[in-house]
Image (tube, rainbow, N blue to C red):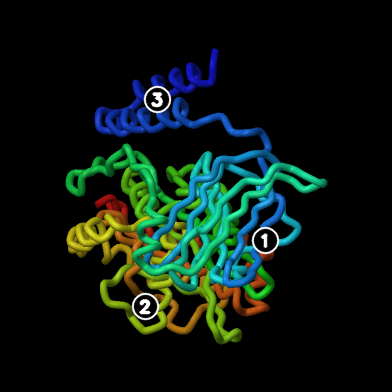
C-alpha cells in the first residue's frame, strides 16, 4: 500500500468516527492534506546550506549561499519594510556558526529557517529600497560547492516595487474554515492549544548568549503539552511541534478550528536593561496597559513581517476579529486565568515581573471565542534568567505550575466552552 493509500484509509476511518459537525472539518482537512501529498515536488535528499556570506564592493552588496546541490530559488521583494525573500526547497542548515541577525551593506538583518513544509526561506531586511542587479548559480569548481549569488544595488521605491514584485502566492491559502462563533459544540474534554511562539525563519528575541526565543518557547510548549496529556483530562493541540514558521493568523485559525477552550502562546522576553527579569502574562486589550506592553505587542506582531509574509489582506481580518471580540465573556475568562490562576501558581515557584499581568494588542490573542493568554517566561536579555530558562529543572518547574493553573481554571469554569 502506498503512502497516499495509507493516508486515505486513515482519514476515512477518522471521518466515519466523527460527529456530523466534525466531519465537515475533517473533510476540509482532507483536501489540504491531499493537495500536499499530490502537489509537493520531490526534493533532493539531504539538501544542505553549508555557508552564508555577505560582501560589499563598489556600492554592490553580494549575498552568497553555499549549497550541496543545484536549486531553483524563488526570489521576490516585499515593501514597508523593504525585504528580499528567497525561497528554496526544504534544506538543512549545516553552518559552522549561526548567522541570524548578521547584516552588511544594503542588508540590515538576515533571517532564515523552515517557512512551511517543503520550503525554507531567507529574509533579507534591507536598509533602503534595493534591486537585484545580478542573480546566478555557480557550479562546483575548485573544491567549492554549488553557490547561489545575488548582487543588490540601491534603487528607488518604484524600481523596487516593479523589479521585485512577487509572482504567484507568497503564502498558501488555508483550505479549512474556523467554526462559527455561535453554537459551538461542547467538547468531550477541554481542548487546550499550546502555541510555541516564533519559529523557522523567525527566531524571535535573541538572548545574551545567543539563545533563540523560538527554541526556548518550543521546549517549554512541548513540556507543558506532555504534562497536560499525561493527566488524561484534556485534548492538547500544538500549533507547531518543530522549528517551522507559522503566520500569526494561522495560529489563531488552528486554535479556532480545534474548538479550543484555552489558548496559551509561549514566549521569552528581552529588555534593554539587562537587570530586568521575571515571568509575566498578557491578555488582549485594544489599549495597552502601559508603554512597555504596547512596545512588546508591536514587536511580537512583527513576526509575519520578519517571516517575509505579505500582509496586504490582513487588516480586514484583524478588524473583523476586533469587532467580534466584543464578546466580553471571552476576555473575562482570559483575564481570570491570567491574573487569578497563572500568576498565583508561577509566583510560588519563580520570580515575577512587577505587575505580572498586563494587556496589549497581540495579534495572536485575537480569537473571538477562545480565552487566550500570552506567557513571557522570563528575560533572555538577563544573563542569569537566560541561563535559568535554558535549564531542564527550571523548565520542569515552570511547566508543572502552568499545568496546575490550567487545572484550576477548568475546575472553576466547568462551562468555560463559550
Residue at image coords 55%, 45%: 88
Mark 3 falls on what kind of element? helix
Check disc 1: other Cα within 10 Å, few if <14, some if 14-19, many if 20+.
Answer: some
Q: Nearer the viewer, mark 3 or mark 2?
A: 2
Task: Judge left or right: residue 388 versus residue 277.
Answer: right
Mark 1 falls on what kind of element? strand
Front-lying residue, 6 or 135: 135
Q: Which residue is mark 2?
A: 294
Task: Judge left or right: residue 108 versus residue 385.
Answer: left
Which residue sits furthest top? 1
Which residue sits furthest front? 58
Pick whichever of labels 1 and 3 is earlier in the sequence: 3
Q: Which residue is mark 1?
A: 53
Pick whichever of labels 3 and 2 is earlier in the sequence: 3
Q: CA distance from mark 1 to mark 3?
A: 48 Å
The number of callouts visible is 3
Q: Quadrant of residue 186?
A: top left
Amino acid at each position: 500500500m502506498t503512502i497516499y493509500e495509507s493516508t486515505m484509509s486513515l482519514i476515512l476511518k477518522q471521518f466515519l468516527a466523527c460527529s456530523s459537525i466534525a466531519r465537515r472539518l475533517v473533510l476540509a482537512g482532507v483536501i489540504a492534506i491531499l493537495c500536499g501529498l499530490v502537489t509537493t515536488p520531490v526534493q533532493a535528499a539531504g539538501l544542505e546550506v553549508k555557508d552564508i556570506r555577505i560582501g560589499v564592493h563598489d556600492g554592490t552588496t553580494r549575498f552568497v549561499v553555499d549549497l550541496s546541490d543545484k536549486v531553483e530559488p524563488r526570489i521576490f521583494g516585499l515593501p514597508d519594510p523593504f525585504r528580499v525573500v528567497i525561497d528554496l526547497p526544504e534544506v538543512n542548515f549545516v553552518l559552522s556558526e549561526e548567522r541570524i541577525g548578521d547584516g552588511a551593506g544594503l542588508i540590515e538583518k538576515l533571517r532564515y529557517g523552515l517557512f512551511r513544509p517543503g520550503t525554507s526561506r531567507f529574509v533579507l531586511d534591507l536598509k533602503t529600497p534595493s534591486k537585484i542587479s545580478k542573480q546566478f548559480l555557480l557550479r562546483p569548481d575548485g573544491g567549492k560547492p554549488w553557490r547561489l549569488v545575488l548582487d543588490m544595488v540601491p534603487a528607488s521605491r518604484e524600481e523596487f516595487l516593479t523589479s521585485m514584485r512577487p509572482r504567484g502566492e507568497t503564502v498558501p491559502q488555508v483550505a479549512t474554515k474556523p467554526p462559527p462563533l455561535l453554537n459551538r459544540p461542547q467538547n468531550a474534554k477541554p481542548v487546550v492549544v499550546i502555541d510555541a511562539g516564533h519559529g523557522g525563519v523567525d527566531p524571535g528575541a535573541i538572548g545574551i548568549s545567543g539563545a533563540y526565543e523560538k527554541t526556548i518557547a518550543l521546549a517549554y510548549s512541548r513540556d507543558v503539552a506532555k504534562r497536560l496529556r499525561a493527566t488524561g483530562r484534556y485534548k492538547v493541540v500544538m500549533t507547531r511541534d518543530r522549528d517551522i514558521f507559522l503566520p500569526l493568523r494561522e495560529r489563531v485559525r488552528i486554535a479556532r478550528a480545534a474548538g479550543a477552550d484555552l489558548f496559551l502562546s509561549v514566549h521569552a522576553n528581552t529588555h534593554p536593561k539587562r537587570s530586568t527579569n521575571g515571568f509575566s502574562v498578557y491578555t488582549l486589550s485594544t489599549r495597552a496597559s502601559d508603554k512597555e506592553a504596547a512596545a512588546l505587542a508591536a514587536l511580537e506582531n512583527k513576526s509575519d513581517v520578519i517571516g517575509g509574509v505579505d500582509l496586504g489582506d490582513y487588516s480586514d481580518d484583524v478588524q473583523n476579529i476586533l469587532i467580534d471580540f466584543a464578546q466580553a465573556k471571552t476576555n473575562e475568562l482570559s483575564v481570570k486565568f491570567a491574573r487569578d490562576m497563572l500568576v498565583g501558581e508561577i509566583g510560588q515557584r519563580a520570580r515575577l515581573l512587577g505587575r505580572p499581568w498586563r494587556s496589549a494588542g497581540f495579534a495572536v490573542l485575537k480569537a473571538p471565542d477562545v480565552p487566550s493568554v500570552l506567557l513571557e517566561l522570563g528575560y533572555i536579555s538577563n544573563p542569569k534568567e537566560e541561563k535559568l530558562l535554558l535549564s531542564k529543572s527550571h523548565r520542569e518547574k515552570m511547566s508543572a505550575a502552568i499545568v496546575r493553573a490550567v487545572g484550576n481554571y477548568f475546575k472553576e469554569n466547568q462551562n468555560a466552552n463559550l
